Image (cartoon, grey):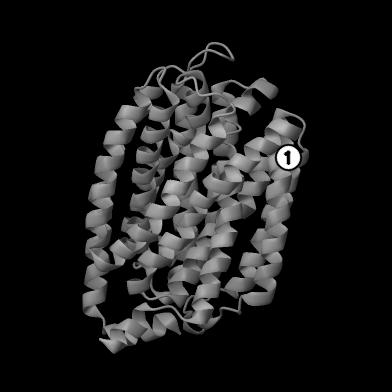
């Protein structure tokens, strides 16, 4: 019992790492998430149609996916700390470019550059989590790291909207870049080098390493699960603010409150889900959260003009379902790769996540129609029906992931595997 407690409790340094990774994810997620609440402002300011805005969102995702694939072969060849700092610096530069863009083409180019660097950071983060934390700890770790998404809604998005309303839509991007510079300095000072994976490398070239990772049948099960998971999550998110304003008649002043309250609820729920995922079967938690999400998505996407208090309640319930399925799913997927392949696996996994999200955003942009700048979005409910079908596929695929991870754990000697994971 005492040994089990030691294996599942966090050391002081692990707590520092969790904080660093959460802060890093906070800035990266905020940079991406801020596009959604700024959607209505950007479409009106730059005279963009929904299809153009959907492409602006997907451009980040596609470039991030491309970058992930190109760097996957090298992901296990370097110290993870140095790799994180390199891509984080590029992300900061891209975000600054977004903050000084003055036209749609300039913004599009800046989003592509930001995606090329920012899209890889998530995979490096997951590789670090897998290196430093045992599987029995990863539900809680993912809960804390994924709290960055809730924090971006509680603090980031409302402040970003305030800055956008006060000084223009450029201000939020410059604010994110400023925070990211501070986080980069913290990484330099507090994060130790991560090189244990370098001692177990077998592939001589990056291309060989990439090929071996892609052709691994068990790894492909995880890749497919991640891609399907991302398609459902990305489909309605880019147009959520435009839908709230033009269809539900939420005002620009109420919009920050909508995001902030949803974020607060996720900050409360996500650590609980993380602990539950470590104590209960992770797939069972995922399946229940997915079914809850389906119900709420169907309700929300079919709303018309609705009182703000009801929009607030339904949005909270929907977001809780969307976020709570991510924690157990990603905790399971991190259990698939071997130590020597973790960087490459996470890079490819992140790449597919970004590409799938880009496809979903682009698809949503083609489905949703807005006749004028101020008219309601049409066909938004169709996206809800598509998400239902995709969610059914996701549940089946994540079940396959669960089977692979359980088989791997049963075939190993737990004490030895855990010691190597924590080392």
Q: Is residue 288 left or right of residue 353?
A: left
Q: Is any atom of residue 148 visible in this view? A: yes
Q: Vertically, is 415 above or below 158?
A: below
Q: Which one is in front, 194 or 33?
A: 33
What residue is drawn where x is 73% and y is 46%?
174
Q: Vertically, is 264 above or below 71?
A: above
Q: Which residue is most to the front?
A: 309
What residue is drawn where x is 43% and y is 71%?
130
Q: Is residue 316 left or right of residue 74?
A: left
Q: Is any atom of residue 209 visible in this view? A: no
Q: Vertically, is 113 above or below 373?
A: below
Q: Vertically, is 17 above or below 166?
A: below
Q: How many numbered markers are drawn?
A: 1
Q: Can you say which quadrant of the picture contains the C terminus?
A: bottom left
Q: Quadrant of residue 390?
A: top left
Q: Which one is in front, 99 or 103?
A: 99
Where is residue 301? Give x, y as percent: 37, 26
Q: Is residue 290 left or right of residue 28?
A: left
Q: Which residue is mark 1?
A: 171
What residue is drawn where x is 73% and y is 40%?
171
Q: Quadrant of residue 139?
A: bottom left
Where is residue 9? Give x, y as percent: 39, 79
Where is residue 288? Give x, y as percent: 23, 49
Where is residue 108? Give x, y as percent: 67, 35
Q: Which one is in front, 416 or 263?
A: 263
Q: Which one is in front, 247 or 328?
A: 247
What residue is drawn where x is 46% and y is 56%?
146
Q: Secondary structure at mark 1?
A: helix
């Amino acid at each position: 019992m005492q040994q089990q407690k030691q294996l599942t409790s966090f050391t002081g340094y692990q707590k520092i790492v969790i904080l660093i990774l959460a802060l890093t994810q906070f800035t990266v997620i905020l940079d991406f998430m801020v596009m959604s609440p700024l959607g209505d402002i950007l479409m009106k300011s730059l005279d963009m149609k929904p299809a153009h805005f959907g492409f602006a969102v997907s451009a980040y995702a596609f470039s991030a996916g491309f970058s992930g694939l190109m760097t996957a072969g090298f992901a296990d060849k370097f110290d993870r700390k140095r790799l994180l700092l390199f891509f984080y610096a590029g992300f900061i530069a891209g975000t600054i470019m977004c903050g000084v863009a003055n036209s749609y083409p300039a913004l599009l180019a800046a989003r592509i550059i930001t995606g090329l660097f920012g899209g890889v950071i998530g995979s490096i983060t997951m590789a670090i989590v897998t290196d430093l934390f045992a599987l029995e700890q990863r539900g809680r770790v993912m809960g804390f790291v994924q709290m960055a998404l809730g924090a971006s809604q509680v603090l980031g998005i409302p402040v970003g909207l305030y800055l956008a309303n006060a000084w223009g839509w450029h201000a939020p991007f410059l604010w994110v870049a400023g925070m990211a510079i501070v986080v980069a300095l913290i990484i330099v000072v507090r994060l130790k080098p991560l090189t244990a994976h370098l001692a177990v490398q077998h592939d001589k070239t990056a291309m060989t390493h990439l090929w071996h990772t892609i052709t691994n049948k068990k790894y492909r099960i995880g890749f497919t699960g991640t891609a399907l998971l991302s398609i459902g999550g990305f489909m309605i998110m880019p147009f959520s603010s435009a839908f709230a304003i033009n269809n539900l008649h939420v005002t620009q002043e109420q919009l920050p409150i909508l995001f902030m309250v949803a974020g607060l609820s996720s900050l409360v729920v996500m650590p609980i889900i993380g602990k539950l995922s470590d104590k209960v079967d992770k797939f069972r938690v995922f399946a229940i959260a997915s079914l809850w999400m389906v119900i709420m998505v169907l309700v929300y996407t079919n709303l018309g003009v609705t009182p703000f208090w009801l929009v607030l309640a339904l949005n909270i319930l929907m977001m809780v379902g969307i976020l709570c399925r991510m924690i157990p799913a990603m905790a399971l997927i991190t259990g698939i790769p071997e130590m020597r392949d973790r960087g490459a696996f996470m890079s490819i996994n992140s790449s597919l996540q970004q590409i799938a999200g880009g496809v979903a955003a682009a698809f949503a942009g083609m489905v949703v129609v807005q006749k004028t700048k101020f008219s309601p979005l049409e066909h938004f409910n169709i996206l809800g029906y598509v998400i239902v079908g995709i969610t059914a596929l996701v549940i089946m695929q994540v079940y396959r992931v669960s089977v692979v991870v359980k088989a791997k754990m049963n075939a190993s000697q737990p004490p030895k595997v855990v010691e190597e994971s924590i080392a």
